[in-house]
């Protein structure tokens, strides 16, 4: 991406306006929890409040004199608490505060997933804090959010993935008929470009990537992904030929276009793709690689951000070139590998104007075929943290942002990218080596997108 385009992404603060979460009410308006000194049933409580401006709504723990009380006049919760507290019959009165679940999954190897949560060393994406906003999976309309893993295949039967594998509800498996009329026969979980069918291989690399994006959370098995409940579309299309890659992306684009055209009755609500392939030392702006930007732009217009892994070499992509991570599409997020020491891996590419962001990619634990889990290293492991983050942010976004998704999915995709790059943790080792100068911070990005207050704030 040209430097001028890249710099535009850093203007999030002036583009986004949002409410300050510290000023948001953290309680239910219009109801108060009250403990009475001598009221242990509904009748006693109501008699106690007779001839006042309050009514008893329900018994909470009547044996202890605790009831839920509501004002019968137009007063604020703060005013109600003040009045109730001064009554002789009231021991205490407090707001009915919202309670946040401490979303720590019970997946047995979660503690080994340093890239998601590692508060001691602080090189993680702060997933635990992000999961307070939600667990990923559905948008505000209750529709499944999908990430397309364009790789060598995914073990769709892996016990820690199968509940999160995308299913084409319009297709009947194995009947040899294109039931939903999308141009693909028996594409139940995705598509195999090599064999031109819906049977996707259980590839080691692709399965590992899929687990980082969305291994099922809190199921007592193996690991957890950035999203606990997202849907993963398996597209077998990682290849040494551009034509094969384009076919893979074309399948993803077709599913999203169908989804938009039919208002969700067909296709899939794909919001991001993940890929780990490319052409080393290739200049995307040389005029020899126009198809790459073209397909990313077309997917982007449909609301799909594409996360791409840069080279697993210590090279300056600005100078040496790389396809696709040296390409200029605004809908492309290019990713390098960071380590547990919060530094760029010495085996990962960089570029002040071409490589957008860092993410954990060294010794990353995730799913492997055959109901196993294990560690792999590379920019390929960093990138699904970002692809998964895109999906997660869609799942916790505000009503205002969702309205933008509905009106213009392409604009919404660009806004997700802007806030992600503007919400990084600054890392000295990425300063001057990436556009954002930092590593993905999922919690910061979730805070911004969830508190966005007005559709008018969007450009």
Image (cartoon, grey):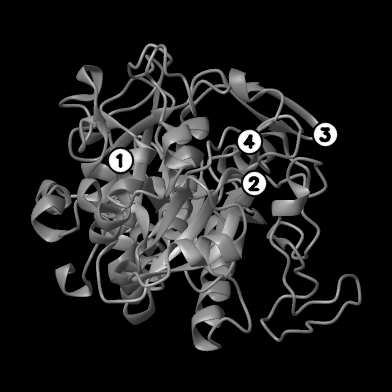
> x%, y% of residue 268?
59, 71
Please name the residue shown 57% across and 81% down the image.
264
The answer to which image quadrant residue 376 occupies is: top right
The answer to which image quadrant residue 434 occupies is: top left
Q: Is residue 189 left or right of residue 382?
A: right
Q: CA distance from mark 3 to mark 2?
A: 50 Å
Label 4 sits on residue? 224
Give the mark nearest the N terminus, 4 or 2: 2
Residues under numbered marks 4 and 2 in contact, where contact means CB atoms less than 8 Å apart: no
> x%, y% of residue 174?
90, 70
Q: CA distance from mark 3 to mark 1?
A: 33 Å
Q: Which mark is residue 63?
A: 2
> x%, y% of residue 356?
27, 40
Label 1 sits on residue? 444
Q: Nearer the viewer, residue 20 or 145?
A: 20
Nearer the observer, disc 4 or disc 2?
A: 2
Q: Nearer the viewer, residue 295 or 56?
A: 56
Nearer the observer, disc 1 or disc 2?
A: 2
Residue 222 shows in the view:
yes
Give the mark nearest the N terminus, 4 or 1: 4
Please name the residue shown 23% across and 60% down the image.
79
Give the mark nearest the N terminus, 3 or 4: 4
Give the secondary structure at mark 3: loop
Q: Which mark is residue 371?
A: 3
> x%, y% of residue 219?
74, 39
Q: Is residue 135 left or right of residue 402?
A: right
Q: CA distance from mark 4 to mark 2?
A: 42 Å
Residues under numbered marks 3 and 4 in contact, where contact means CB atoms less than 8 Å apart: no
């Amino acid at each position: 991406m040209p430097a001028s385009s890249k710099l535009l992404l850093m203007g999030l603060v002036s583009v986004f306006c949002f409410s300050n979460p510290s000023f948001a009410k953290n309680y239910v308006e219009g109801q108060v929890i009250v403990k009475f000194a001598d009221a242990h049933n509904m009748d006693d409580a109501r008699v106690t409040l007779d001839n006042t401006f309050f009514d008893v709504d329900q018994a909470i723990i009547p044996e202890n004199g605790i009831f839920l009380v509501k004002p019968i006049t137009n007063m604020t919760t703060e005013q109600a608490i003040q009045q109730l507290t001064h009554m002789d019959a009231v021991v205490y009165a407090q707001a009915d505060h919202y309670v946040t679940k401490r979303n720590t999954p019970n997946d047995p190897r979660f503690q080994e997933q340093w890239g998601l949560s590692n508060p001691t060393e602080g090189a993680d994406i702060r997933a635990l804090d992000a999961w307070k906003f939600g667990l990923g999976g559905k948008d505000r309309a209750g529709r499944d959010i999908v990430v397309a893993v364009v790789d060598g295949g995914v073990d769709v039967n892996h016990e820690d993935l199968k509940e999160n594998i995308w299913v084409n509800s319009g297709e009947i498996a194995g009947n040899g008929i294109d039931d939903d009329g999308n141009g693909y026969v028996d594409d139940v979980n995705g598509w195999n470009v090599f064999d031109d069918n819906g049977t996707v291989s259980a590839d080691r690399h692709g399965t590992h990537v899929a687990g980082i994006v969305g291994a099922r959370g809190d199921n007592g098995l193996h690991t957890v992904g950035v999203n606990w409940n997202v849907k993963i579309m398996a597209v077998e299309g990682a290849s040494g030929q551009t034509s094969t890659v384009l076919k893979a992306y074309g399948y993803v684009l077709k599913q999203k276009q169908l989804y938009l055209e039919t208002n969700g009755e067909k296709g899939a609500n794909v919001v991001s793709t993940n890929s780990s392939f490319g052409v080393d030392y290739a200049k995307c702006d040389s005029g020899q690689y126009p198809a790459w930007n073209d397909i990313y732009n077309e997917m982007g217009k449909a609301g799909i951000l594409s996360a791409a892994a840069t080279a697993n070499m210590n090279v300056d992509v600005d100078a040496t070139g790389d396809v696709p991570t040296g390409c200029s599409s605004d809908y492309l997020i290019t990713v390098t590998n960071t380590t547990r020491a919060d530094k760029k891996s010495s085996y990962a590419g960089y570029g002040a104007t071409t490589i957008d962001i860092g993410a954990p990619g060294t010794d990353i634990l995730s799913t492997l075929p055959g109901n196993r889990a294990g560690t792999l290293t590379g920019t390929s492991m960093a990138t699904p943290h970002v692809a998964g983050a895109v999906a997660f942010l869609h799942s916790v976004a505000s009503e205002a942002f969702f309205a933008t998704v509905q009106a213009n999915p392409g604009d919404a995709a660009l806004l997700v990218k802007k806030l992600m790059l503007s919400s990084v943790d600054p890392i000295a080792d990425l300063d001057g080596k990436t556009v954002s100068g930092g590593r993905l911070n999922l919690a910061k990005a979730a805070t911004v997108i969830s508190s966005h207050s007005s559709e008018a704030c969007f450009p």
